[in-house]
Amino acid sequence: MTIDRLTWILERVFYYSLMFLLLASAIYSISHDYSLAALILFVLFIFVLHKGVVCISIPANSLVLREGKVVFLIPEKTVRNRFDFVSRGQTIFTLPHYSLLDHPYKLETFFPDNKGGLYACRLSLQLVYNTELTALQRAYDSVILHQDWLKYEVSRLLFKSSGCLVCPPVSLQNEEAIQEYLKPLVAELNLGLESVGLKIKEANCSFTAGPTLVRLVAAEQVILEKEPLI
């Protein structure tokens, strides 16, 4: 179960439990002729009912759906009238953030330096959702298809795309030159991310050169180099 889903369930449990407690307390107060206390409790009950049931708190990066099709994106956290969506036959679906977009993805690519040696480009990629409507539909479909395995699918797509990169020899002097160097790499990696509706927001790279370059293979890398998970 994702953190987003767990948070939503806990929020629902909190509101319904609080409403039940307030209503029960109000009924008890009326039955014992505590009119003022009953009035206050009923006012609080109506307030919680409006806050928890009538109003809907919508997290950032939420999709408005109608019959499984994306209508539009709500990019920022907001509060709306729940029944406005219900009357239109629309539902709210929040795209995942935790463990998917809250950490950079690491890639390491190796190339010959035309002098008998090697150089490595260690990429750190921060991803965001592509806000085009067709891309948002692909993002929704990929979440439904892969669910908790989506972060591994994203890593697999980046790993696959990195095998198609062709980079010239490194001769970079400043940050502007590095960003210019990264443009074709980012464009190629973005092509691989199209199927899950993501794109690269920020890319950083550090370079290492030498006659031999050695790396320790993480467990996740071993998984990605095998057959696709899904």
Image (cartoon, rainbow, N blue to C red):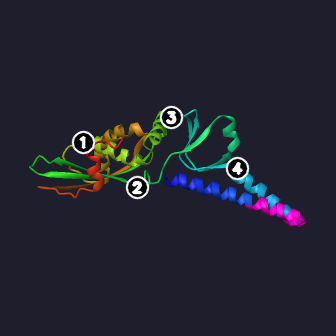
Q: Circle 1 is placed at which residue position? A: 163
User: Does the magenta run of residues contain 19?
Assistant: no
Q: Is residue 112 above or below residue 216?
A: above
Q: Circle 3 is placed at which residue position? A: 133
**Residue 102, position as x, y percentages in the image:** 44, 55
Contact? badges 4 and 1 (CB < 8 Å): no
User: Does the magenta run of residues contain 22?
Assistant: yes
Earlier in the chain: of badge 2 and badge 4, it is 4
**Residue 146, position as x, y percentages in the image:** 42, 43
Report the Cα–Cα distance between label 2 and label 3.
25 Å
> Which label belongs to residue 53?
4
Residue span colored magenta? 21-37
Report the Cα–Cα distance between label 2 and label 4.
33 Å
Disc 4 marks a residue whose amino acid type is: Val
Q: Circle 2 is placed at which residue position? A: 103
Element type at mark 2: loop
